[in-house]
Amino acid sequence: MSNYCENCGCRKVSGYCTNCQEEAYIAFVQAPDMDFSEEFMREAWRQENERNSKGGEA
Ligand SMILES: [Zn+2]
């Protein structure tokens, strides 16, 4: 299990790449109690779903 993003090589924080998954990281890890715009949350969920679906891939 790598601690580094397989896309950009950045170190992951709490399972999120703060570069590729910035919105998801902010929305779910950094400030989960904060109110974000609909667009921001849509992007955050898109990244979260992508993250979850990447399980077995190279
Ligand atoms: Zn990345």
Image (cartoon, grey):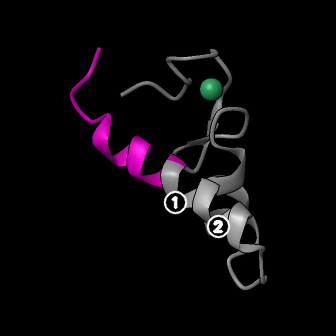
Find the distance from the CA under tag 1 to the CA under tag 2.
Answer: 6 Å
Q: Residue at x 49, y 17 (%)?
A: 6
Percent of width and height locating residue 1: 35, 28
Instruction: State whether residue 57 is above or below residue 44.
Output: above
In screen coordinates, is 53 left or right of 48? left
Q: Residue at x 78, y 82 (%)?
A: 34
- What residue sits right under mark 2 in the picture? 41
Is the CB–ligand 1 distance for label 2 below 8 Å? no
Percent of width and height locating residue 52: 34, 47
* Label placed on residue 45: 1
The secondary structure type at the circle numbered 2 is helix
Percent of width and height locating residue 7: 55, 17
The secondary structure type at the circle numbered 1 is helix
Q: Amino acid at mark 1?
A: Trp
**Quadrant of the frame with the C terminus:** top left
Percent of width and height locating residue 55: 26, 36
Instruction: State whether residue 40 is above or below residue 19.
Output: below
Which stretch is magenta? 47-58
Instruction: Determine which quarter of the picture holds residue 26.
Output: bottom right
* Label placed on residue 34: none
Question: If the picture is divided into quarters, which one holds ligand 1?
Answer: top right
Nearer to us in this view, 42 or 26 = 42
In screen coordinates, is 25 left or right of 55? right
- Mark 1 Cα shell of 10 Å, populated few (<14), some (14-19), many (≥20): some
Q: Residue at x 59, y 62 (%)?
A: 42
Q: Amino acid at mark 2?
A: Met
